Amino acid sequence: MSFAPPPLRRRQFLTSTAATTIASAASAAALQTAKAATATPTPTPTAAQLRTMVPTLSKAAVGYIDMPHDGDVCGACIWFKPPSPGTTISHCHLVAGPISAAGWCQAWMRRS
């Protein structure tokens, strides 16, 4: 009695070799994709970058008023943009159009 395995035929050998090669290439590609996805961390935006990413809203949308509210004023808010040199018109990073430094809106946040 002979317990030796039967000899591989040429077609079986080529098929199994090709399948192994394809599986190895696919796993290597998947590994590279996973490394690329985790290798580049997303940087945390600065406060100035966050302000440029915020959409501009209408005065009505944020409940803007031209007077202080409980002592809070636009001039002390993080969204406030002081007047440019030579002008007296203030602006806001959130609210469209000119605003008063003594005004207030619902998006008000104390500047630290």
Image (cartoon, rainbow, N blue to C red):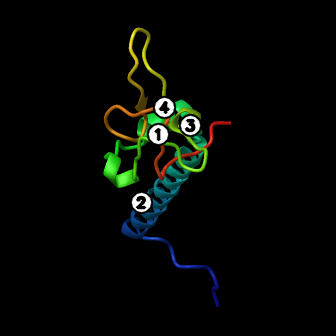
84 over 105 or under it: above or below? above
User: Which residue is under mark 2?
Assistant: 18
Q: Which mark is residue 78?
A: 3
User: Which residue is under mark 1?
Assistant: 103
82 over 77 or under it: above or below? above
Residue type indicated by callout 1: Gly
**Residue 34 can be seen in this image:** yes
C-alpha distance separating marks 3 and 4: 12 Å
Q: Residue at x 38, y 14 (%)?
A: 87
Residue 4, horizontal then vertical, whole percent: 62, 80
Q: Which mark is residue 101?
A: 4
Residue lying farthest to the top in this orientation = 86
Q: Are marks 4 and 2 in contact (CB under 8 Å)?
A: no
C-alpha distance separating marks 4 and 2: 73 Å
**Residue 46 can be seen in this image:** no
Q: Are marks 1 and 2 in contact (CB under 8 Å)?
A: no
C-alpha distance separating marks 4 and 1: 6 Å
Task: Give the number of the mark in front: 1 or 2.
Answer: 1
Residue lying farthest to the bottom in this orientation = 1
Give the SS element for disc 3.
loop
In the displayed structure image, the side of residue 64 where residue 82 appears, left or right: right
Residue 66, horizontal then vertical, whole percent: 41, 41
C-alpha distance separating marks 2 and 3: 63 Å
Q: Residues within 10 Å of mark 2 (few under 14, many from 20)?
A: few
C-alpha distance separating marks 1 and 2: 73 Å
Q: Residue at x 47, y 36 (%)?
A: 51
* Image quadrant where one finds the N terminus: bottom right
